[in-house]
Amino acid sequence: MSREIVIVGGGFAAQQLVKSLRKRDAQAPIRLVTADAGDEYNKPDLSHVMSRGMSASEMVRVSGPAFAEQHSLALQPHCRVERIDRERQLLHTTDGEIPYGQLVLATGAKARRPPFPGSDALITLNSLQEYAAAQPALEAARHVLVLGGGLIGCELAMDLASSGRQVTLVDLAPSLLSALLPAALAQPLHQALLAQGGRLCLGQAVASITRNPAGAQVVLSHGERIACDQVIAAVGLAPRTELAATAGLAVGRGIRVNSRLQTSDPVIFALGDGIEWQGQCLPFLQPIVLGANALAATLLGTPTELVLPPMLIKVKTPRYPIQLAGRTRGDDLRWQVEWDGAGLQAQALDASGQPCGFVVGGNRMSAAFPLLRTLPR
């Protein structure tokens, strides 16, 4: 029986787990199986590559082979896992069979593509490989339409505008960051994007995209036609659950895990954007870092539960940055708000008058950590 810890995936979650394991044990056998090259890069930089003029190759911090050497692990790059044989504790892959002692699924999530005519023309930027494929087209584009007014969509729109491109942002919601903020608190960001020359088409969806030699023709749900060069989709992530589901593991919105990040199979665990923990999907860095620390301890023989403190979410829109934490949506919330032309500080109070969330923006960013300490754990 293999003693090897086998990790499927090559993104931030997989690499963070490797680092956490090596901090605790320099000798435990680890194998990383990934469909890409296994290169280490900073994924949040994908929202800022155009203004920084970064190429895909320049984003690589450490190559896959160098990462494997640094952390004394076996790397199998460009290897796809076809199925999991739970009874024999084997992976069936394009490189053959791989036995495992403990298995970690860090398979991540894929960018959602709305099902409208021409959606195959959408560019997605959810990985280094996707950016490498789209880089020439984006560099040549002068007018880019961004579909999605959430965290990533706003970051991309502001970055593209900062790089001198014409930007149109389209979202079905009537305000930006609608899943995170009340409409009134998103207004400063709205104004910052307009001040950069961006155009916002809110309360609308894309009905279709038609490619032509000059670029793309986008038809909105209200009938308006917009000519642009490229269209980027930033409408959320869909956890990759196919491998787990085919193996008979419990899945819902993501791969279901318990408090120790254990799946319905006692020797198979999951980490990262693809999991469902306590009914939530958590596609943010902080839960992955804390999850990797807890899971490393569990895999090495000290069962450890994942405990998350109030999570600080950063919206990295440089012309108007925002940070928020706790509960910031709900009709029952009462807000204490201070703002001026340069910044915003808003604290949410629950029905009992206790602080339960906050939003800071602009020049009030330094208030984030003091406010974070006021939130219940």
Image (cartoon, rainbow, N blue to C red):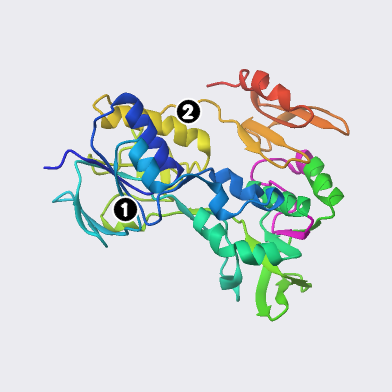
Q: Is residue 218 visible?
A: yes
Question: Which contiguous range is marked in magenta?
Answer: 164-186
76 relative to 217, above or below: above
Three-letter amino acid code at disc 1?
Ala
Residue under label 2, please give it: 308
Outermost residue toward the bottom in this view: 213
- Foreground of the two, 301 or 4: 4
- Foreground of the two, 133 or 320: 133
Q: Earlier in the sequence, mark 2 or mark 1?
A: 1
- At a point 35% along the width and 52% down the height, the residue shown is 34
Left or right: 99, with 181 as reference point: left
Mark 1: secondary structure: helix
Characterize the local packing of mark 1: few (<14), some (14-19) or many (20 or more) Cα atoms within 10 angstroms: many
218 relative to 330, above or below: below
Left or right: 326, with 63 as reference point: right
Query: Mark on residue 244?
Result: 1
- Foreground of the two, 356 or 141: 141
Image coordinates for residue 10, horizontal then vertical, percent: 40, 48
Image coordinates for residue 298, horizontal then vertical, percent: 29, 29
Image coordinates for residue 60, horizontal then vertical, percent: 51, 47
* Image quadrant where residue 358 sits: top right
- Foreground of the two, 330 or 229: 229
Three-letter amino acid code at disc 2?
Leu
Is residue 165 shown in magenta?
yes
Mark 2: secondary structure: loop
